[in-house]
Amino acid sequence: MKPTVLVVDDKPNFLSLLVKVLGSDAEVVTARGVREALRALQTHPPAAVVCDLKMPDGDGMDVLRALRASKSAAPFILMTAYGTVPTAVQAMREGAWDYVTKPFDPDVLRGLVLRALRESAVLQNGSAASTAGDSVEARSAESFGQLVGASAPMQSLYHMIERMAPTDATVLVTGETGTGKELVARELHSRSGRAGETMVAVNCGAIPPSLIESELFGYVRGAFTGATHDRAGLFEEAHRSTLFLDEIGELRFPLQARLTRVLEERAVRRVGDARERRVDVRLIAATHRDLPAMVHDGTFRQDLWYRLNVCVIQLPPLRERREDIPVLAHRFLAVQSARGPRGFTPDAITALMAHSWPGNVRELRSVIERAAILEESDLITPSSLPPEVRGRSLSRGGRAVAEMTYREAVDTARDEGVRRYLEAVLQSHKGNVTAAAAQAGVERESFHRLLRRHGLRAETWREEGGEAHPTRVSHVDDRDDEDPSD
Ligand SMILES: Nc1ncnc2c1ncn2[C@@H]1O[C@H](COP(=O)(O)OP(=O)(O)OP(=O)(O)O)[C@@H](O)[C@H]1O
Ligand SMILES: [Mg+2]
């Protein structure tokens, strides 16, 4: 089934050209103005919209707003005449996916529409996947179940998971913190013959060493004080299913020995019990530690290492697959509330890609979640990113204009202009926000928003002992606190 694309323009000739250009890839619905477009949104919910900016009966931006009001995330591509680029930039801020300047090459538009359809399909599969739980079969170039990423290391990861999942082999997942080890474990389980049973997960680092033995293997009544009844351990609980031993590197030496025996014999003995119970458990283990080094130091048993070292999945740190950062960022943004920002400015993406991400995907996720809350406009800007992330991109002054894309240059110039203006107004009103806002002719609230967005703080211009401090605060990380001014 071909996706529906709504094209909106007041010129019939132009519409028929678009039908010709897009007709082989999409079901093209045409509208000869804003009014017809609004009706078409109801009758033919589109997968993408291509819309003219200025039409006799209204503005293309109204179509965009109606599209968003109808809760549709369909990409919106604006067609503008030469000279209206600032409006187009504004449209991007309000959630347009991209724009083309007339006149344009039909193939360029076609490419743009196809890419928009492809990317939004991936996003939609993604949000469906995150609500549908474990039983997700969907696989695209950009994701694999719950895992997101299109880079070469991720592709080979997907391939390995596919091959290992259906076997009963023990798998060891290694990687730095936040690289997705637990996600991989869940993916292995949900693609195995054991998927019908719940995976049992235990974090060996989180359970006190004195308790972990009885947790894993269970106990019988009277085995120790407080053991008032028999209890099965997690191994027995995971019978016919998968046991995920997270942070296996934290297991103490004696327990490593017991675990090795369980893996050899496929049977467990509860603490205080003489009887062995057979268990059918598939083991997946994970660690951020360097187990071979631990074996070398004598802190990890070699025999256990041999048992674990059969199938090893090594997750690359995020900084080694930076091309996954934009797709991850968009995905995390998409699963946030529907009201927040819908995308990123180019310099926000640049900043995200430049950061080294010591906390890997988990860090990226929380940065995006935080930015989505802080950001007041429709696109996440560097000012809503934490200082350590936006740090490098902020030296935009040091970046040659010639290295920028046209759009980046327009954004940068605009931001710079607005910032200088705000600084001047604050300066002349000595940091009094009410007066500055009145002078600027905007609501006080909006003025505060502008200040936050540009990393400015009014009190910087307040007189302190008769001296003004017109320094710009570039590390504003308390923006979710109460406003300091007034
Ligand atoms: N490839 C990925 N695609 C989507 N989300 C991911 C990916 N990798 C990690 N995440 C997300 O990042 C967070 C951390 O993932 P996870 O808990 O699996 O990491 P971990 O390697 O087990 O970390 P730790 O060593 O700290 O326990 C989770 O919110 C997870 O959903
Ligand atoms: Mg983990």
Image (cartoon, rainbow, N blue to C red):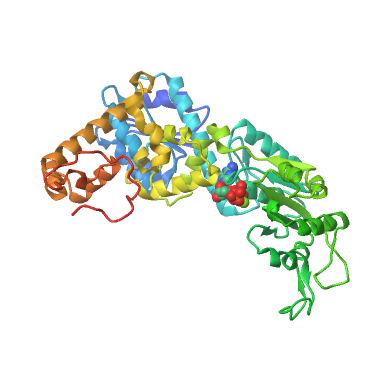
User: From what the image shows, is residue 113 above or below residue 401?
Assistant: below
Query: Foreground: 186 or 262?
Result: 262
Task: State the residue at coordinates (18%, 48%).
Answer: 443
Residue 77 at least partly seen: no
Residue 141 placement, left or right of 13: right
Q: Position of residue 307 (x, y in %)?
A: 81, 47
User: From what the image shows, is residue 340 above or below residue 94?
Assistant: below
Residue 168 placement, left or right of 421: right
Task: State the residue at coordinates (35%, 27%).
Answer: 408
Task: State the residue at coordinates (39%, 32%).
Answer: 393
Quadrant of the image containing the C terminus = bottom left
Residue 172 at least partly seen: yes
Quadrant of the image containing the N terminus = top right
Residue 342 figure quarter: top left
Q: How many marks?
A: 0
Residue 159 placement, left or right of 411: right
Q: Position of residue 258 (x, y in %)?
A: 81, 59
Query: Foreground: 73 or 322?
Result: 322
Residue 422 figure quarter: top left
User: From what the image shows, is residue 2 above or below residue 82?
Assistant: below
